[in-house]
Structures are given as structure tokens and as C-alpha cells.
Image (cartoon, rainbow, N blue to C red):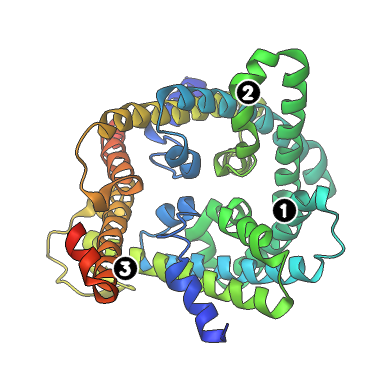
Amino acid sequence: MSILQELKRGIFAENPTFRLMLGMCPTLAVTTLAVNGVGMGLATTAVLLGSNLVVSALKNVIPNQVRIPSFIVIIATFVTVVSLLMEAFAYSLYEALGIFLPLIVVNCIILGRAEAYASKHSLGKSALDALGIGLGFTLSLTVLGAIREFLGAGTVFGLQVLSESADMATIFSLPPGAFITLGLMMALINGLTARRGKRSVARRNPAVAKREG
Amino acid sequence: MELFMIFFGAIFFNNFVLNRFLGICPFLGVSKRIETSVGMGMAVAFVMTLASVMTWLLQGLLLNPLGLGYLQTIVFILVIAALVQFVEMFMQKVSPTLHKALGVYLPLITTNCAILGIAILNIDYKYNLVETIVHSLGAAIGFTLALVMLAGIREKLEINDVPDAFAGVPIALITAGILALAFSGFVL
């Protein structure tokens, strides 16, 4: 599989948020602003890259029975490194992400990739997989953050889009708005995928499509 | 009074699921039936309280005196994983009925971010041991409450005609959003 295809798989076909529905807690919690979405996405990608590389490198060393605890320790180590780095170099983001930074440890995406992919594939492939899945996660968080920021505060990435006097739907910056926005986006993506699937069936086999109709 | 506020705050104003977004995976995953959601809630309540006490003691007696605060994440997650394993073995030995009822949910709890979340929050808020216990009990009750409410609604939703694109998780998320809206009314 080419590099581009590998990356595309993580962003579209196996998008962690909209397809696999993993890592929901940070997705809902930090996306009040687009910037926070980017920060959380990149932090998770960094941890994922580190853990995938180490797990892949050690795949023949770690005994099968204790692999899950070993993976968790590897992941927790990278989470600690990333959160210390963020505290030192991006303090405002560190404050904004708060408790969800240490909670990257229990993000199912990372343990899932270690178990399902990195422990069975080569170093290079695992790194690409981490980048693809991480970018997919970052992209989803950024889009969700941008939509909520726009609807809730009239800004996108801190830039004023609507006039300051406009009445904004503040609810989208609050917890209920997170659930509702994500639910609507998922339904939109489901709807689009279903329609696209139907069309590609129609192209390949018009008779079947007509019958199902 | 202080304890009262912490307890009810954790159940209503700062509901763990609907307001703090901790434990969303089991919230969406095991909320299809009321029975299973009650089971999950009990298992979480049990582990949450035990884990909070353990991690609080570790932080106070080991990490802080030795200046190892940066190891918090690693130590806590290991303690929680070990604790869950231990609780499972203990239950199997002492009360097979309880183990049968809660057993399937226990392995899932290790990666439930509500558990690690409350352990870290207790330290962040500088709670003492009693406050820690009260806070985790409240949080667990809040978690169970939200889970059972969503399960009740989803059981009804199943016999309704939901548009294809919304079936499953999307409609559950929107339902949760409306629940969260109701819970945010407690602030006033």
C-alpha cells in the first residue's frame, strides 16, 4: 500500500471519530474552540506515534500474556512526556486541555492501534498508521471545534467572523452543544456515505439498484 | 455542608458524563438496556470509590514525599488496572453471584476515563480523604443516573421510526445533548 493510501485510510475509511467512534471523551470535551481541537489532536498524534513505534519495535520482546499492561505503561510514558513538554512550551493550551491531557492514556484509539496494528506490523508501517489515524482524529476535532466556535461565539480560530453584536447560540459552546453537534455531524456523514454507496452500486449494477430502490 | 455540596455537585451540577464528558464510551456503549446499565453503574461505583482512595493514599504517602509528582499518570493507571484485576478475582472467590452480574463490565472499566479522571480531579482539587470518598460516590451515582436515564430513553427509541442516518449513535448523542441541557438547569 502506498504512503498516501495508508494516510488516507486513517483520515477517511477508518476515521477514529466518525467511523470507529473511539476517543469520544476528548472529542466532546475540548472542542469548544478550534484551537483546542488542533492542540488535542496533535498531542494525541504525538503519543500515538511514539507508542506505535515502541510497541512495533518491541513486538517480539513483549510476552503475549502481559502485553496489555506493557502497552499501557508505554503509552503512559509518552503521555507524561507530551504533557511535560506542553506545560513548558504551550502553557495556555496545557491549561485549556486540563485533565484531558493525562487522560490521553485511556483514549481507546491509542491502545486500540497498539493492539490491532503496531504489535503485528513493521516500524515504518506502524508510524504511517499512527500518522494517518492521528491526522484523522486531529481533522475531526478541528472541524467540530470550528463549527462549535462559529455557532457559539461567532469566531473561527479566534478570528471574528460575525459582528460582535450578533446574537450567538451560546449553547454550542456549552456541554449540551457538544453532544448535539457531534450527533448531527455523524448523521450527516452516515447519510452522505449511504447515498454514495447506493450510487456506486447503481454504477456497477443498475438492475440491483433499481430493485432496491 | 461542604460535603453535601461536593456530593450533590458531583451528581447534578458537574455530572460526570453530561457535564464533564468523562466515561462517554460506556455511556454510549452499554446504554441500550436498563438492566445492563444498572450493572455497569454499580461496577463503576465500586471501582471508582476504591480507586479514588487508593490513588489518594499513594499520592499523599508516596509520590508527594518523594517528589515524584510527574509519575502520577503512570502510577495511577497501573494502580487502577491492577485494582480492577484484583476486584475481579476477589469477587469471583467471595460472591460468584455478584461476579456474574458485574463481571462482564469489569475489564471495560480499566479504560473508562471516569476512573482515572476522578483520581486526578481529587488530587487537583486538594480534597482530603473524606471529601475524596464523598466526591467519588457522588460521581458514581451521577454516572449511573445519566446512564440509566439514557438507557430508558433508548429502549423507547428502538420501537420508534428513526431516520436511517440517525439510527444508533447519532440519535443517542442528540438525546444525551437534550439530557445535558436538562442537567445544566441545576446550575441556577
Q: Amino acid at mark 3?
A: Ala
| Residue found at x 24% / y 62% | A153
Q: Position of residue A127 (x, y in %)?
A: 65, 76
Which quadrant of the figure contains the N terminus of chain A?
Answer: bottom right
Image disc number at residue A146:
3
> Above or below — where is B39 with respect to A76?
above
Q: Nearer the viewer, residue A188 or A47?
A: A188
Mark nearest the camera among 1 and 3 is 1
Label 2 element class: helix
| Residue found at x 56% / y 86% | A2
- The answer to whether marks 1 and 2 mark residues whose Cβ atoms lie closer than 8 Å is no
**A52 to the left or right of A64:** left
Image disc number at residue B125:
none
Nearer the N terminus, badge 1 or badge 3?
Answer: 1
The Cα atoms of the two marked residues, 1 and 3, are separated by 32 Å
Q: Position of residue B69 (x, y in %)?
A: 74, 51
Q: Which residue bears the numbered disc 1? A: A72
Q: Position of residue A140 (x, y in %)?
A: 40, 66
Q: Amino acid at mark 1?
A: Ile
Q: Is residue A151 visible?
A: yes
Q: Position of residue A143 (x, y in %)?
A: 34, 68
> Above or below — where is B174 with respect to A111?
above
Mark 2 Cα-neighbour bin, 10 Å: few <14, some 14–19, many ≥20:
few
Q: Amino acid at mark 2?
A: Val
| Residue found at x 74% / y 20% | B92
Image disc number at residue B130:
2
Mark nearest the camera among 3 and 2 is 3
Which chain does the residue under circle 3 lie in?
A
- The answer to whether marks 3 and 2 mark residues whose Cβ atoms lie closer than 8 Å is no
Label 3 element class: helix
